[in-house]
Amino acid sequence: MYTTYVGSFPLDYNRENIERIMRDVSAISIDYPCYPQLMDFVAQFLEPLVKANILVKRPWGYLLISEVKVSIDVSDAERQALIAVDYVKASGLSKYFKGLRACVTGPFTLASRIYLKEPPSPSNTLLAQLEYLEPLVNYLRRIIRDFLDMGYKYINVDDPYLSVMVGARAILHGCSPDDIMDLLDKLARSIPSISGIHVCGRISPHLAELLVQSYFSILDHEFVDSPANFNSYTRDMLEDYDKFLGVGVVSSKFAAVEDLSKAISILERAIRRYGLERVRMVKPDCGFRGLRGAQRTVELAYSIALRKLKVVKEARDIIASKYGLEVG
């Protein structure tokens, strides 16, 4: 049972803040820290496509004007990841971590922001014609290879739009379950190390059935702000497909720092429902970027994010001690 987080922090994007965050999370002893995601999680993957004249940026999203290509300039995500990993190696912080985690925004979330024509509408995003998603997936696979070459051990695909797209009764945009599985597994199979997928919001039974059959090993969700997700999976489902959970034990939406007892109770509930061996990652529900707008200053928002991470770490340590798990 390890600690991690989804990625984003409420600080400005610069080298100093990336290095600062890596120092701060090493002091907390987070097992698998993600590179600090200090830009919009969609823009950092799509802006290189704008520079390559594949997309045109609009106030409402992005307009596709050319075929997506794999060999283009590195993304802003890769720049942040490289700064983080180089600093960790040079400063000797590696000894505090089990490994580094890299987050990749998923194809369905990216495609939901790219339009085939104007004016924009849900019916003319890339999701309306799935043949456009294959090049997008190949672009993301190239970025994953770059992360692996940098030394990242845990690759997590963040695809929150899936919780909107795959409802309890229907799948939007005319997509079939096979379409979704095929594209997700093209990404998952390109990850030889620890692989995970993060989907926030309510996980419908239909979506849970898809994710549990995917090649991702860790299914990462919200359990504080979306407690109904405790009903999305069963222990048998996870055992039958040999899947593990990333369980959110503190909120990413609300600035109040949780009592340690609350985080422990959520973790205990997950263990009772799914089994100790199926709860693999302990984490915040989602990223912390949203805390920025809820506080007077970014420094206050950042201090709250760190305090929440300390609650995550302390809750895991207490549970590990209770059940005789090794940590550190």
Image (cartoon, rainbow, N blue to C red):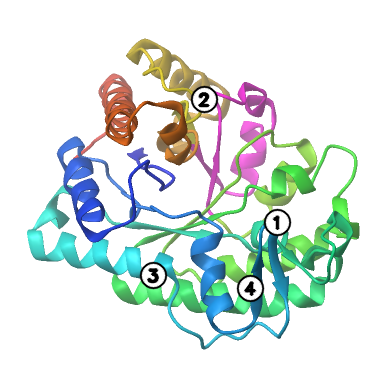
Which residue in the protein does label 1 denote? 60
Find numbered disc 2 in the image and state the secondary structure of the residue it sits on.
helix
The reply to whether callout 1 and callout 3 are in contact (CB within 8 Å) is: no
Measure how far apart labels 2 and 3 are at the Cα level.
34 Å
Q: Earlier in the sequence, mark 1 or mark 3?
A: 1
At a point 43% along the width and 32% down the height, the residue shown is: 291
> What are the residue bounds of the magenta stretch?
217-246
Mark 1 or 3, which is nearer the eye?
A: 1
Which residue in the protein does label 3 denote? 78
Q: Is residue 286 left or right of residue 5?
A: right
Q: Earlier in the sequence, mark 4 or mark 2?
A: 4
Q: Is residue 244 left or right of residue 162?
A: left
Which residue in the protein does label 2 denote? 270
| Residue 266 versus residue 179 in the image, above or below | above
Give x and y (percent) for residue 263. Answer: 41, 19
Give x and y (percent) for residue 222. Answer: 56, 33
Which residue in the protein does label 4 denote? 137
At a point 73% along the width and 50% down the height, the residue shown is: 210
